[in-house]
Amino acid sequence: MTRVDQFESVFRSADKPVFEYHPLELGRILVVCDLIGAQARTFLAEVRSLLDVLGPAARWELVDGDAFTTTGELLECVSTRRPDLICTYRNLHSEAWRWPHSLGEHLDVLTQTTSSAVLVLPHPAAGRRDAHTLADTDTVMAVTDHLAGDASLVNAAAAFTSDGGTLWLVHVEDERGFERTMDVVSKIDEIDTQTARERIHAQLVKEPADYIGSCRDAILARRPTLAVEEVITVGNHVVEFRGLIEEHTVDLLVMHTKDDEQSAMHGLAYPLAVELREIPLLLL
C-alpha cells in the first residue's frame, strides 16, 4: 500500500456520518380497517391508546369497511385526506390473513405508492397478537442492514418510543454476503485472509457503532428519559430480528420499505413484514 493509499484510508475512516435529531411531526393520522360500526370504533380506540406517545395534537380520522372495497378506492381515500400516518392491518377485505404469506394486495400497493408512513398491526381476527401488543410503545426497535447515516429511520423510531422507554437500534450485516466476500478474498494470494476477515469485520461493526453513539448523544440531549441501546451483529436477518424481538419484548418494529431503484418493497423489508406478524410494524 502506498503512502497516498494509507492517507486516503485514514481520511475516509475519519469521515463519519453524525446523527441530527429532528422530532417527527405527525399531524393527521388515518386509521383504516375493513370493520364497520362499533367494531371499527373499537379498533380506532385501540390504535389511539397504542399511539398515546404522539400526544394530544394529533388529528385522528377513521375510514371503515363501508368506505372502500378495492385498492383503488382505498388509494382515493388516502389521496383526499393526505395523512402523515396510516394505521391499518394486513389482508384488508380478504381472508388471506388465515395464511402467513402476504400483506394483502391493498397494503402491497399502499406501502409503495403513498409517501405516508404506514403502521401495520396484527389482523384482529388472526389471533397472533403477543400479550403486550397494542398496550404501549415503551420498547421500540429500528432495524436495517445499513444504519450509519439513516437519520430518518432513527428519528421515526425515537418519535414512537414512549417517555421512559427503550429505543433499540439494530444493525444486522448479512452473513451470507460477508462470507461470499471472504471467499473471494481467500482466493487472492496477495491478501492475508485471516487478517482481512478480522479487519473487515471490525470495520463493519465500527461504522454503525460510531453512528449509534452519535444517535444516543443527540437523542438523550433532547429526551433524557429514553434509553438508547444497540445491537450490531452478522447473521440471518429474519432469524436475528425475530430472536431480538422475543428477547426484548419489542412493542414496535420500525423499518424502511421503499426502494428508489424498484417498484417492489425494499428487499430486507418484505420478508420481515410477512414473517413478523405478531407485533406492530412501522413501515417508512
Image (cartoon, grey):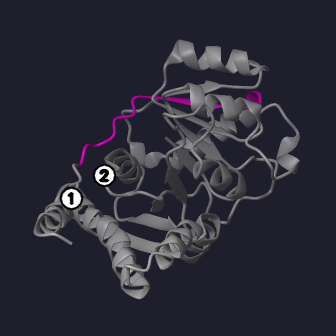
Q: Residue 2 location, x and y as percent?
A: 16, 69
The quadrant the N terminus occupies is bottom left
Q: Can residue 49 be seen in this view?
A: yes
Q: Name the residue under label 1.
A: 16
The residue range painted magenta reads 21-38
Residue type beneath disc 1: Lys
Residue at x-position 52% and y-position 34%: 261
54 inside magenta stretch: no
User: Residue at 40% of width from left, 56% of height from top?
Assistant: 161
Is 125 drawn above or below residue 260 in the view shown?
below
Residue 46 occupies quadrant: top right
Q: Residue at x 12, y 63 (%)?
A: 4
The answer to if 33 sits in the magenta stretch is yes
Label of residue 149 in the image: 2
> Is 252 positioned to the left or the right of 88 in the image?
left
Residue 227 visible? The answer is: no
